[in-house]
Image (cartoon, rainbow, N blue to C red):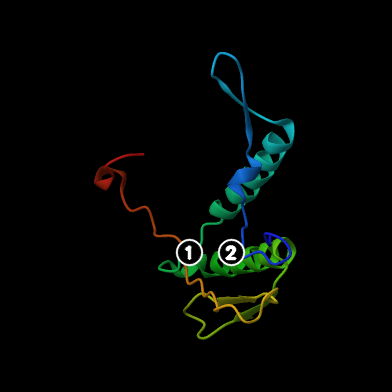
Amino acid sequence: QNSGEGGTNIMLWDTAQISTAVSKFGSIRPTEKARTFNRSMVTLLSRFVNIPSVPQVAARRKDCQTAAVFLSDVLERMLPAEVKMVQCDHEYNPVVFACMEAKQPDLPWVVVYAHYDVVAPGTRENWATE
């Protein structure tokens, strides 16, 4: 989501939308709009993290492709952005490029680099927490 005409922020999940009303007892109650938006974002994030995109496991490479397609779709629909997936090598996840038109082209570029895959959990006895 662009922060508006002349804005300088780009947001996928605008936490300001999770606005709250404080009761006379000081408890925090999210507005209905905020609860609905929050549920939608949590559902979307839950779907994304449930894709077992573990590139170290050959049997999961198809899941890595699924995660890349999911991410591409979200970026196209929510920003909206022009998205391209580039498969550099069949052994690696596709690279997801997203580009948005700038409202103020004279401002500096913003590059976000992140990975969308996960690490295999290993054995439970090596876990510190669940």
Q: Position of residue 32 (x, y in %)?
A: 73, 31
Q: From what the image shows, is residue 22 above or below residue 68?
A: above
Tally of marks: 2
Q: What mark, if any, has residue 67 been given in the picture?
A: 2
The residue positioned farthest toward the bottom in the image shown: 88
Nearer the observer, 46 or 3: 3
Alpha carbon distance from label 1 to label 2: 8 Å
Nearer the observer, 7 or 75: 7
Q: Which residue is mark 1?
A: 117
Q: From what the image shows, is residue 23 above or below residue 7?
A: above
Amino acid at the residue labelled 1: Asp
Mark 1 or 2, nearer chain start: 2
Image quadrant where residue 16 sits: top right
Callout 1: helix, strand or loop?
Answer: loop
Q: What mark, if any, has residue 6 been given in the picture?
A: none
Instruction: Tell me if 18 is positioned left or right of 53 in this view.
Output: right
Q: Position of residue 33 (x, y in %)?
A: 74, 36
- Residue at (52%, 75%) from the top-left corner? 111
Amino acid at the residue labelled 2: Ala
The reply to whether discs 1 and 2 touch (Cβ–Cβ < 8 Å) is: yes
